[in-house]
Image: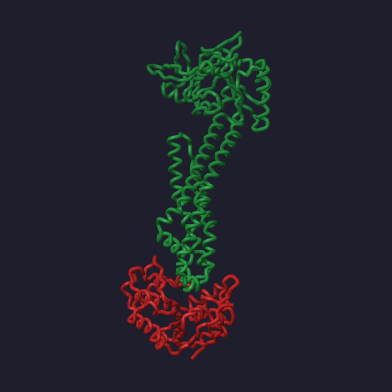
Chain colours: A red, B green
Amino acid sequence: MTLLLEAENISRFFTAGRARSLALAPISLQVQRGEFLTITGPSGAGKSTLLNVLSGLDRPSAGSVRFQGTSISSLREQRVALLRNVYFGFIFQTPHLLPGKNVLENVGLPFHYGEAVPAAEIRQRCQDLLDYVGLGKVAFRYPGTLSGGEMQRVVFARALARRPQIIFADEPTGSLDAKNARRILSLLKAQTTEGRTVIMVSHDTEAIRFGTRVVGLEKIESDEE
Amino acid sequence: MNSLLLDVKDAWLGLLRKPLRSLLSSLGIGIGVTALITMLSISEGAKKSALEKIHSLGTHTLRIETIVSAATGGSSVNLSQGIYHEDAVLLSEWLGSRGRVGEYIRSDNVVLHFGNKSVVGTILGVNAQWFAAENVNIAQGRALTREDVLRQSNYGVIGHALADALQVGLLSTVQFAQYPTTIIGLAAPKGRLLTEGTGLSSLDFDNTLILPIATMPFTRVIAGRALRDGLVISLDSKEERIILSTAEQVERMLLKNHREVRDFMVVIPLSLIKEARESQQVFSLIMGTIAGLSLLVGGIGVMNVMLANVAEQTREIGLRMAVGASKARIMSLYLWNAVLLTLSGGLWGTGVGVVLALVIQYYAGWEVVFSTFSLFLAPCAAVLVGVVFGLQPALRAASLDPAQALRDT
């Protein structure tokens, strides 16, 4: 297996006025290509913060994150944005979709940024992804007309649009019923067989079973300084 | 599709999502632009009218007329006697080769006959220099000469509209009262003397029969001195300083000649340019202030709406950042949002401004002119307001932390 992502002694503080609270205790971890890593732990352990720092949505207060040997913690904001666009896909607990765009356009949102791709190719790729997640027939419907499960599958399709190397999923099944949750988890699992890496935050025991490795975080007791 | 077009399209769709809010926030800008367009078109119209008037009166010309007593209801009873032929002679000798002095006497609403046609027109008695001083050109035949005046010939030069109405040509004999006049010249079209606001009498050159002043049947003579209705002095110099100083000296000489009785007025068309410019500047300042304030208030409204949009769309901003939008692209999106908002206000404001200016022209009778500059300036001003007032909300959107923005509820 190939080392893809590496975190070295990363931690994250948040400051509010003079108060400083610890959101992520120092942690080091390595993620291999094709791995399905599940981050688990109680509320307030810093699971989402860890995911945000690993994915470049946030920067660590200390330590560094390296993707394919490049420190993303020290990259300029524009480069990190490009990295997220090209190499990372995101699934959140609440399916975030743009209400003014139809399903097909939502899936194609990552193509608004980064390297240009011909419109016809974008359209074909997005339609293929919607077919893959079983939503080929709702391509021209608007998010407001979809169920929660359908919306999360649209988000899943969008996460795959740029053919990323890592999919970051933050409680992807948190707002879904058991049937839809299993469907999303299966789709995620299937990605690892295609060589993609999945890093998922979850406290759902069934979801954890889909992973190949579990990283458990402990609740941060004294988080005020 | 390139990133600029994508941002513009997304910004436009963002505005359409809240159409009422967008419309209301563009109102201020629209009103400001309406005021700007109306102000500029009226201002341009006033400028054009003033220039036309000044051009009509002659830029290097002095006009002197007898002051008619207001107490007599505008009849031709003078405060003293008014302008005399001797005044013209004095000024002509003083000016020498520096200019020409035209004298005239006029009689309005005279019925002229030719064959079975009768037309009401003006009869003007002039000296030979009047044609050059008034810059009246002859289309056919010739102008009246010094000999025509001295001999009291019954020759006349006719304005082209009057000639058309009477259907006369050269050497036709036109009759008014018991006086026959043989047409020896046809004046080239010249239009009206635009005298509104100057105190001078108006004259429609094209509807006038011009006779030698000595032939004029309605001459008034007081104590052996022939009265004139006015003089027109054309100067060779086009220098403002020389024209103004000549006017001052002419006025002083006339006052002295009239024993300090101001029974005449001297109008200097060149100084009207200054007055027109000053009043136009005052008008532009007032309207410009109104337009500027409207744009300022409109801009603040747009800023307010943009800040509300950014606050409402925090999660959307976080999502765009997560899928690869840089801070620059987020800023571009919200800047376009503001610019499109103000531009739409600017465009409909331009349309309303044009209509309003035309309505003012129709009802108030003011001339309005739509210059390419003003039609271009107004939407540009709206865009500028969009950029200035959209900058802060756009910066706020771009400075959001993606992780925190995604957590926004």
Taking the image as drawn, is residue B234 in sight?
A: yes
Query: Which corner quadrant holds the C terminus of chain B?
Result: bottom left
Q: Quadrant location of the N terminus of chain B?
A: bottom left
Q: Nearer the viewer, residue B108 or B162?
A: B108
Please tell me how many numbered marks the rendered image carries.
0
- Between A176 and B100, the one lying in front of the other is A176
Q: Nearer the viewer, residue B345 or B318?
A: B318
Q: Looking at the image, which residue is at 49% across and 55% down?
A: B302
* Percent of width and height locating residue B226: 59, 12
Q: Is residue A69 visible?
A: no
In percent of width and height, residue B278 lies at: 59, 36
In the figure, is residue B46 to the left or right of A189? right
Horizontal placement of B92 versus B408: left or right? right
Q: Is B143 placed left or right of A148 in the picture?
A: right
Q: Quadrant of residue B239?
A: top right
Up-down: is A76 above or below B257?
A: below
Answer with the quarter of the image where residue A198 lies: bottom left
> Residue B219, how many percent across, how many down?
54, 12
Q: Residue furthest bottom?
A: A1
Q: Identify the residue shown where x is 53% and y is 42%.
A: B287
Viewer-proximal residue, B86 or B5?
B5
- Residue B353: x and y, percent? 46, 45
Compared with residue A200, is residue B54 higher up or lower down, i.e. above or below? above
User: In the displayed image of the protein, which residue is found farthest to the left?
Assistant: A137
